[in-house]
């Protein structure tokens, strides 16, 4: 066996956000217990193929995230929206503990091609998960072309995606999603269009879904009840071995009297339930894998003795060398899993009739035995898998590493991992009380209005702000109120502002994003462009525009072109700027006549943004001040537009003409005579 070739290369949790070759992240949904900015920035970079500064320039949302309300607000990861729990809503779970992601990827050149990815994790969306803990993740990818092939068997995977989307759809009704639809005026936001695209992809999967899903959650029943149901659906069969692992067990005081505590331990209740359903033999081998430094109730000496009397073995979780390397620093167990199987009679190394649970639910009452809605349980999610490929207990010659259980799970059965007594065990810290809850503010975002050359922040139409709402400047002082919902801002446009209002429990504050005139949220300033830059960035559509001065690592200054280097100054004579403008218009026409209708609104936004950045370049200034002509007029002609937007009779045409009129205002050529007369010749 070629060991080098056979080594497992499992991606980290962040690595599962990587866009497939030829694709970029379009939109995605996440839910979880906790997250941090460092992990989210890495995940968003992998998902979009854009570094933070590029995402900040686009000002759009790529990932929408719903966390337990006790998680502090994460607001400054470009491209990621931390949605907050709606105030006044009754929380239908003790903790939001499910760790699920649904990611949508779109092909970079073929509009109709897409991929969906479902992630079910035992770990949180944090750097601690990536760097320090032992966690598990299950991943499912479905491609559009696979659905189009009637010969493929995707019904089970589509059922999983449908079930996961059912959970996220239900969950988002409790969260403030207004920012996802934030846009200028009546236009649909790019983020909302991406969400709609993904909804169509999800519906295509739902249409192919058949049979029970492997994915499940604890809204309507406990994890244990649903695991038992899924095992019965697969066929009742007794196994002689079971391994149970968890990153957290019941606290010592949960069990009441010590004599009763052992019988009430959730791992033993799981074993009894499986035996009663005929899915585990009467005298099975039972291993409980623990993190010795954090065993909660299992760290008690009497509990350990009672478990030994019941032939239950405690073992340390192991950091698999096949995944992390022989010299890897040991990691702490955080994964939650159950693995059960038989050993082969002829080949004792084979695992037969195996099944695996992995998910978010710890082996506690709130995590595993109670449903979230009415029994005070957590909202949990997981999968039950029945491996189709042969599995083996131990690594031996000619056995692929990815088929060895001790490489796939944090388990081992050597004497060195055996826990003989409670001397090496510690209860560890109990669950820490969390601050909060952090709830959605009354206003989700503010609009930046500088039409009168005076910066103002305005509450968007449709959002009712309380009379006590204040916008605080950089020094923390209230900004002057110009009129109801309009506040004077004494400096350049901010990306975020802090607001204050009187809540039920006194004054409250929150940071909210600011939208600019292009519909960009919390966006950095756009650099000035010359006409050569404009042409290049429009031709790259739908990929986000590159930033001037950006290096490969996202570092460097974003600055306007140096005076004297504009493209309009490289030629000689007055005809040169005219030729340049004509070339730009012809390139725009050539590009936009090939745009798909699904991308048209996004194209109009990009056109307005990029041309707006060129409003002070030499060529535009020449047309405005020297010629007093409107060079944009030819773009109104039908021959310069796709068939679905040839005139204002269609919403596509109206959206386009509105963008052109705003560009004319920015260039200060509105009302000027058109270049070339009434038509382009």
Image: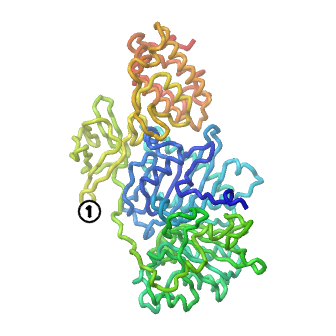
Task: Decide: is 124 above or below 576.
Answer: below
List the residue tagged with mark 1. Answer: 505
Q: Is residue 659 left or right of residue 106?
A: left
- In the foreground, 97 or 572: 572
Report x, y in % for residue 302: 46, 90
Q: Residue at x 47, y 18 (%)?
A: 567
**Mark 1: secondary structure:** loop
The picture quadrant where one finds residue 309 is bottom right
Q: Is residue 546 left or right of residue 448?
A: right
| Front-lying residue, 294 or 66 | 294
Q: Is residue 393 left or right of residue 317?
A: right
Above or below residue 250? Residue 539 is above
Can residue 132 be seen in the rendering of this structure? Answer: yes
Quadrant (top left/top right/bottom left/bottom right) for the N terminus: bottom right
At a point 51% along the width and 11% down the height, the residue shown is 676
Q: Can residue 161 be spotted in the picture?
A: no
Q: x%, y% of residue 109?
A: 63, 37
Q: Above or below — where is 638 with respect to 419? A: above
Q: How many marks?
A: 1
**Residue 100 location (% of width, % of height):** 53, 60
In the rendered image, the quadrant that contains the C terminus is: top right
The scheme the figure's colours follow is rainbow
Q: Quadrant of residue 414?
A: bottom right
Residue 134 or 22: which is nearer the viewer?
134
């Amino acid at each position: 066996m070629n060991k080098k070739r056979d080594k497992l290369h499992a991606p980290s949790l962040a690595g599962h956000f990587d866009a497939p070759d030829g694709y970029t992240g379009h939109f995605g949904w996440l839910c979880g217990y906790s997250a941090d900015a460092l992990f989210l920035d890495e995940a968003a970079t992998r998902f979009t193929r854009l570094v933070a500064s590029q995402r900040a320039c686009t000002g759009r949302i790529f990932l929408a995230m719903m966390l337990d309300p006790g998680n502090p607000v994460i607001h400054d990861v470009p491209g990621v929206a931390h949605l907050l729990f709606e105030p006044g809503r009754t929380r239908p779970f003790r903790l939001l503990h499910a760790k699920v992601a649904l990611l949508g990827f779109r092909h970079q050149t073929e509009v109709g091609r897409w991929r969906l990815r479902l992630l079910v994790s035992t770990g949180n969306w944090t750097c601690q998960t990536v760097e320090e803990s032992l966690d598990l993740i299950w991943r499912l990818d479905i491609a559009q072309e696979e659905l189009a092939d009637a010969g493929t068997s995707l019904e089970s995977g589509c059922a999983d995606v449908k079930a996961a989307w059912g959970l996220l759809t239900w969950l988002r009704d409790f969260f403030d999603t207004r920012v996802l639809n934030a846009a200028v005026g009546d236009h649909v936001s790019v983020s909302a269009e991406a969400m709609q695209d993904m909804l169509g992809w999800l519906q295509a999967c739902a249409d192919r879904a058949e049979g029970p899903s492997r994915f499940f959650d604890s809204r309507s029943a406990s994890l244990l009840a649903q695991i038992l149901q899924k095992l019965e659906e697969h066929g009742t069969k007794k196994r002689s071995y079971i391994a149970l692992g968890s990153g957290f067990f019941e606290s010592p005081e949960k069990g009441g009297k010590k004599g009763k505590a052992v019988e009430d331990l959730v791992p033993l209740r799981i074993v009894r339930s499986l035996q009663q359903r005929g899915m585990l033999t009467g005298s099975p081998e039972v291993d409980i894998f623990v993190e010795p430094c954090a065993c909660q109730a299992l760290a008690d000496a009497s509990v350990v003795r009672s478990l030994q009397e019941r032939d239950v073995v405690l073992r340390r979780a192991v950091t698999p060398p096949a995944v992390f390397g022989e010299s890897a620093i040991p990691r702490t167990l955080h994964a939650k899993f159950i693995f059960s199987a038989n050993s082969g009679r002829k080949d004792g190394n084979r695992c037969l009739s195996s099944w695996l649970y992995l998910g978010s639910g710890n082996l506690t009452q709130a995590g595993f035995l109670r449903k979230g809605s009415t029994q005070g349980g957590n909202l949990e999610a997981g999968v039950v898998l029945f491996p189709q490929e042969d599995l083996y207990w131990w690594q031996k010659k000619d056995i692929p590493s990815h088929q060895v259980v001790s490489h796939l799970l944090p388990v081992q059965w050597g004497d060195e991992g055996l826990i003989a007594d409670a001397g090496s065990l510690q209860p560890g810290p109990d669950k820490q009380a969390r601050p909060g809850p952090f709830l959605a503010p009354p206003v989700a975002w503010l609009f930046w209005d500088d039409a009168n050359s005076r910066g103002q922040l305005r509450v968007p139409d449709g959002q009712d702000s309380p009379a006590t709402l204040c916008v605080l400047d950089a020094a923390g002082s209230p900004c002057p109120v110009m009129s109801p919902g309009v506040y004077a801002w004494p400096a350049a446009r901010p990306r975020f502002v802090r607001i204050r209002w009187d809540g039920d429990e006194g004054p409250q504050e929150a940071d909210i994003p600011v939208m600019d005139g292009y519909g960009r949220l919390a966006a950095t300033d756009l650099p000035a462009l010359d006409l050569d830059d404009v042409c290049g960035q429009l031709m790259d559509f739908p990929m986000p525009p590159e930033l001037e001065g950006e290096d490969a690592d996202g570092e460097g200054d974003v600055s306007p072109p140096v005076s004297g280097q504009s493209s309009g100054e490289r030629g000689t004579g007055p005809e040169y700027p005219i030729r340049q403008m004509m070339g730009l218009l012809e390139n725009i026409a050539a590009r936009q006549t090939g745009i798909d209708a699904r991308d048209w609104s996004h194209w109009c936004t990009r056109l307005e943004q990029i041309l707006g950045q060129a409003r002070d370049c030499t060529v535009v200034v020449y047309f405005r001040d020297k010629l007093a002509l409107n060079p944009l007029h030819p773009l109104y002609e039908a021959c310069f537009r796709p068939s679905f937007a040839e005139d204002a009779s269609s919403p596509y045409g109206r959206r386009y003409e509105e963008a052109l009129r705003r560009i004319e205002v920015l260039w200060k050529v509105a009302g000027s005579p058109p270049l070339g007369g009434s038509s382009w010749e």
